[in-house]
Amino acid sequence: GTANFVNPGITLEIIDGLEDYLRQQGLEDINEVIGTLEIHGRTQQADCR
């Protein structure tokens, strides 16, 4: 969203960062990460609609 106004190259930086993270974790597909967030100490699940 608005981050692009401050840094027009942020989208590419985020993509590069995600690729680096996947590589470091030995993951091949971003779908292996989607939906895996765990927040400790919370008893309710987030509604992702």
Image (tube, rainbow, N blue to C red):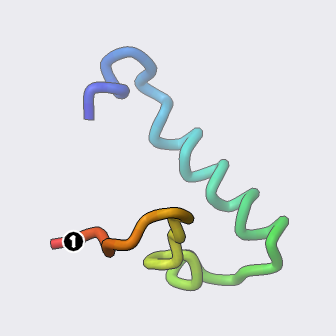
Residue type pointed to by label 1: Asp
**From what the image shows, is residue 45 above or below residue 24?**
below
x, y percentage for residue 8?
A: 41, 24
Question: Residue visible at 35% across and 27% down?
Answer: 4
In the rendered image, which quarter contains the C terminus? bottom left
In the rendered image, which quarter contains the N terminus? top left
Question: Residue visible at 38% across and 15% down?
Answer: 6
Going by the image, does 20 lie left or right of 14? right
- Report the residue that reaches farthest toward the left: 49
Q: Nearer the viewer, residue 31 or 42?
A: 42
**From what the image shows, is residue 25 above or below residue 29?**
above
Going by the image, does 10 lie left or right of 46? right
Q: Quadrant of residue 32?
A: bottom right
- Disc 1 element: loop
**From what the image shows, is residue 40 above or below residue 26?**
above
x, y percentage for residue 12?
A: 53, 42
Going by the image, does 35 lie left or right of 40? left
x, y percentage for residue 35?
A: 44, 78
Q: Quadrant of residue 18?
A: bottom right
Q: Quadrant of residue 28?
A: bottom right
Crowd class of label 1 (few under 14; some 14 to 19; many from 20; radius 10 Å): few
Q: Which residue is mark 1?
A: 47
x, y percentage for residue 36?
A: 52, 77
Q: How many marks?
A: 1
Q: Nearer the viewer, residue 16 or 40?
A: 40
**From what the image shows, is residue 40 above or below residue 4?**
below
Question: Residue visible at 82% across and 79% down?
Answer: 26
- Report the residue that reaches farthest toward the top: 6
